Amino acid sequence: MTQLIWQSPQWPAFSWQSSVLLELLVKVRFAHGKLLAFAPLIEAQRGDILLIDSLDRDLTKDRLVELFGEFRESNLRNSGPPAENLNAELKKFLAWFNEPPVGLDGVLRAGIAFFWFLVIYPFEENNEEIAREICELALAQDEKLAIRLYDLPAQLEANLGEYQKVLAQSFRGDSDITDFLIFFLDLLLKALGSAAEPAAQLLKVFQYWKNKTHLELNARQRQLIDFLLSKSDSSISNREYVEHYKISRESAKRDLKDLEKLNLITLGAGRGRSVTYTLK
């Protein structure tokens, strides 16, 4: 019978093939750097989205127990270490997490932490959620940002079948976790890619408004401009404006004419309620 990874003589001294990971890690770092450039804008929009407590505090057993309850008392069939080993196993994990080896890439640290915690599986429930939180904490520590710039759990959910397969394979055998780290880096690259377009849109809106803060516009007019900035054709009809904001035709006409006078939109095709306005 194939041994479980925690039964390996090397446990928990994980190994991986750096040459195999290098190209993917470089792609992740490049995408990461591009997204980090948007961090101040994203933080202004989402500054209340925090991870597990402070980035600077050590992760401890007491903090985990306070947040997630007591350790499991039962053994897991064909999976993690026995319950009587959990204190020792978590102690080793936390010591490594709080003082990682010098030179270990922060992204790889996050992937290793995610995998390692899942192997230990110390709590009765929610272990995968806790592992994701610890992974995101490690990424935030690497970024030095206490906000989520991208949605890693969403990508994990979208690739659940592959995740379960690679996890099951990596749980068995020796200490080499190259396959899991390939999956993790690819998952992170997808998450970064999914976040890039909304971040670019946020920058587009910011750049548009930065020289227009003096303009006296009502909330509907500002929302309309933001809406037009998000559209590929950047246009809206009089009728669409009335229906979207549930206002009278006269109010819509007044709003649109004011924006036209301010040289923010221009009159396009159509007549009457079908007349269109386009962002300048």
Image: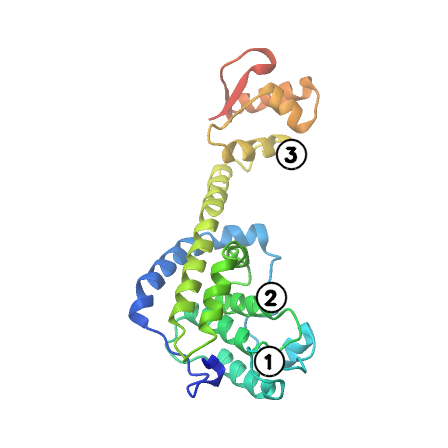
Circle 2 SS class: helix
Q: Position of residue 59 (x, y in %)?
A: 57, 77
Please tell me how crowded label 2 is: few (under 14), some (14-19), or many (20+) other residues with Cα within 10 Å: few
Residue 218 in view: no
Q: Which residue is mark 2?
A: 129
Mark 3 packing: few (<14 Cα in 10 Å), some, or many (20+)?
Answer: few
- Front-most of residues 129 and 105: 129
144 shown above or below 34: below
Is label 3 or label 2 in front? 2
Quarter holding residue 101: bottom left
| Residue 16 point in image, percent of width and height | 36, 74
User: What residue type is disc 2 on?
Assistant: Glu
Visible in this render: residue 272? yes
At x 42% / y 70%, what residue is drawn? 108
Marks 2 and 1 sit apart, C-alpha to C-alpha, by: 17 Å
Element type at mark 3: helix
Q: Nearer the viewer, residue 222 or 156?
A: 156
Q: Earlier in the sequence, mark 2 or mark 1?
A: 1
Seen at 66% across and 82% down, the residue is 74
Residue annotated with mark 1: 60
Taking the view exactly as shown, the residue that stands out farthest to the front is 1
Q: Which residue is mark 3?
A: 219
Label 1 vs 3, first from the N-terminus: 1
> What is the count of numbered marks?
3
Real-space CA distance between mark 1 and mark 3, rounded to the nearest whole angstrom = 47 Å
Q: What kind of residue is marked 3?
A: Ala
Judge the density around disc 1: few (<14), some (14-19), many (≥20) Cα neighbours within 10 Å: some
